[in-house]
Image (spheres, helix red, strand yellow):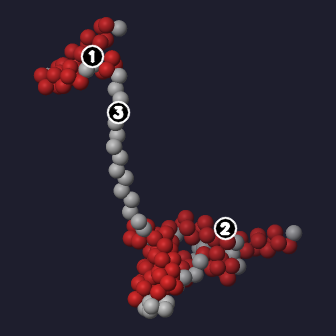
Amino acid sequence: MTARVANHSAGERLQAAITDPELAHEVFRRMCDGDRLALIAREKGFPKGRFVEWFMTTQTDLYKLARVVRAEDHALAALDAAMSATPKTAAVMKLRADVLLKLASRLDREHYGESVTVERDVSVKVDVGLIGSAEELLRLIREKPVAALEAKEDADASAV
């Protein structure tokens, strides 16, 4: 019972705090410095789920921008790791750089994610009985595109 009362008062504290516009900017600054939303919620005594939901849904631009900032930090740290590698530390630094780049790609897919190009050959099977032969269709298009189609539609309608 006391846990439920404690959660209720934490929810009330959150409700009162989110009306302060400075809270969103503080959360943004802390996210840019590497803090996670769950940690910020815990330190402030807010219910994690409701706090994360509030920030991600009502402060969407700040949330996205903080992720971009963190992605750039990870990408630059990956570069530093790669550049500081020595023959003895190359394997560890490669692992560190790979992990940092993977994180950067998840935080900001547009800049650091892999791009995928899908190429596909498509073949279509057509029932000649339904649309007629290709030669007949090409002839109709060359002669009188609109008039031919209207005449064909009229002929098909009267045949039914």
**Observer-nearest of 83 and 154:** 83
Quadrant in the rendering for residue 158: top left
Q: Nearer the viewer, residue 59 or 33?
A: 33
User: Three-letter amino acid code at disc 2?
Assistant: Gly
Task: Examine the image and state in which quarter residue 150 appears.
Answer: top left
Amino acid type for the residue under numbered disc 3: Val
**x then y, percent, for residue 54:** 59, 68
Local SS, label 3? loop
Identify which amino acid the numbered label 1 is placed on.
Glu
Quarter holding the N terminus? bottom right
- Cα separation between marks 3 and 1: 23 Å
Q: Badge 2 local density, few (<14 within 10 Å), some, or many (20+)? A: few
Which residue lies at the image location 26% right of the left edge and 11% below the top edge?
155
Distance from Cα at disc 2 to Cα at disc 1: 61 Å
Crowding at mark 1 (Cα within 10 Å: few <14, some 14-19, many 20+): few
Give the numbered dot on residue 124: 3
- Give the x, y percent position of residue 11: 71, 71
On the question of residue 115 being in view, the answer is: yes
Q: Earlier in the sequence, mark 2 or mark 3?
A: 2
Residue at image location 47% in from the left, 82% down from the top: 94
Residue position marked by numbered label 2 in the rendering = 49
Q: Would you say 7 lies left or right of 65 here?
A: right
Mark before the other along the chain sequence, 2 or 1? 2
Which residue position is annotated with label 1?
153
Residue at 70% in and 72% down: 47
Whether residue 69 sits left or right of residue 159 in the image: it is right
* Real-space Cα separation, disc 2 to disc 3, in angstroms: 49 Å
Q: Nearer the viewer, residue 123 or 132?
A: 123
**Numbered disc in front, either 2 or 1:** 1
Q: Which quadrant of the figure contains the C terminus?
A: top left
Is there any visible trace of residue 65 in the rendered image?
no
